[in-house]
């Protein structure tokens, strides 16, 4: 794409990632709490209600209880999303996804998205583990630094990447569905109302991003449950696993809690990813447009 260098993708992606995660953090806390409930010890776990859980956290911990771990996500989200969008844009361009032939290229968008998530998750996973542990009810950690120090001392560096394989295997289909749905939805909206596509571009990004986030979030919920259990194992009484095998963890969850346990947190996950993707894509595209104008004006002077 003319007029863009990697630094523009990194800057736009970093701002978009921060906006997405900061805005939706309380919903992410609800999802984490729901996914770490051991169904065998709570006969009501399948009937967990998002509204009741929200009220319970605010009542017992105050509004700040919804934001425990936000500093960890703030440290990780910017660099991770900078890598995410940079790799996506460069791969899409290299694979020919920016050809002006009027066609949709779902395989190119999906492949670019998978490459992007491999790079992004390598950066984000350690801080995501810290964030998840701080989000737990009665978390034993007093903040990001305390969590990092204690994890390194008690579990070693490998604890920060115990869920990396699961994260990749979850986010690969997530991003494939997300990016291909987003690009397809943009094209459909533009074809339905071509005369308004330019003037209502923000609405296009919001709508396409929301649809892509909701669908991708829903279909990858079981893997997200496995990821959360691996990241929080051994904390606050959570079960410990002998390995990070996805198949083994899934079998243990199903054997102890039933198959429905793999869908714990589905509603808050969709409630998170639909608006989060809408915020992320609209912020990213707006930042990209701003940086494009800035670069052109600077070069014209």
Image (spheres, helix red, strand yellow):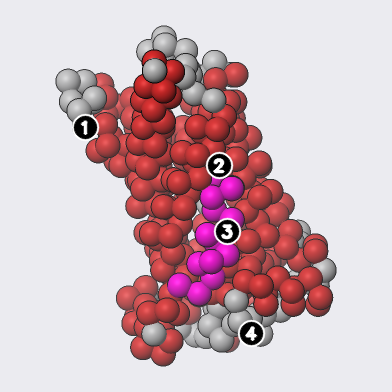
Describe the element under mark 3 as helix, strand or loop: helix
The residue nearer to you, when weighing 151 against 166, is 151
Binning the other alpha carbons within 10 Å of mark 4 as few (below 14), some (14 to 19) or many (20 upward) gives some
The residue labelled by disc 2 is: 82
Q: Residue at x 21, y 20 (%)?
A: 194
Left or right side of 127 for 35: left
Cα–Cα span, label 3 and label 4 = 21 Å
Q: Nearer the viewer, mark 2 or mark 4?
A: 2
The residue labelled by disc 4 is: 140
The residue nearer to you, when weighing 67 against 175, is 67
Specify the principal SS of the magenta part. Answer: helix
Q: From the viewer's perspective, is residue 235 above or below residue 117?
A: below
Describe the element under mark 4 as helix, strand or loop: loop
Q: Which residues are magenta?
A: 67-81
Residue 8 in percent (x, y) is at: 50, 32
Q: Which mark is residue 101?
A: none
Cα–Cα span, label 2 and label 1 = 26 Å
């Amino acid at each position: 794409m003319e007029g863009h260098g990697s630094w523009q993708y990194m800057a736009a992606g970093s701002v978009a990632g921060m906006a997405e995660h900061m805005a939706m953090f309380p919903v992410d806390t609800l999802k984490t709490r729901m996914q770490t409930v051991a169904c065998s010890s709570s006969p009501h776990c399948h009937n967990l209600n998002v509204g009741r859980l929200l009220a319970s956290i605010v009542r017992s911990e105050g509004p700040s209880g919804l934001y425990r771990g936000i500093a960890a996500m703030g440290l990780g989200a910017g660099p991770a999303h900078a890598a995410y969008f940079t790799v996506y844009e460069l791969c899409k361009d290299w694979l020919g996804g920016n050809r002006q032939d009027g066609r949709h290229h779902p395989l190119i968008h999906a492949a670019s998205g998978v490459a992007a998530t491999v790079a992004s998750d390598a950066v984000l996973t350690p801080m995501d583990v810290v964030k998840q542990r701080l989000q737990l009810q009665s978390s034993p950690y007093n903040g990001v630094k305390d969590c990092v120090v204690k994890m390194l001392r008690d579990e070693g560096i490998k604890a920060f990447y115990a869920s990396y394989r699961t994260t990749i295997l979850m986010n690969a289909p997530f991003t494939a569905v997300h990016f291909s749905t987003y690009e397809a939805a943009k094209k459909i909206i533009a074809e339905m109302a071509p005369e308004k596509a330019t003037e209502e571009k923000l609405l296009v990004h919001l709508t396409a991003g929301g649809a892509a986030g909701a669908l991708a979030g829903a279909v990858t919920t079981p893997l997200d449950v496995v990821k959360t259990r691996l990241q929080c194992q051994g904390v606050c009484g959570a079960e410990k696993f002998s390995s990070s095998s996805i198949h083994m963890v899934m079998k243990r969850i199903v054997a102890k809690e039933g198959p429905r346990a793999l869908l714990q947190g589905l509603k808050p996950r969709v409630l998170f990813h639909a608006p989060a993707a809408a915020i992320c894509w609209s912020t990213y595209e707006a930042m990209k447009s701003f940086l494009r104008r800035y670069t052109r004006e600077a070069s014209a002077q």
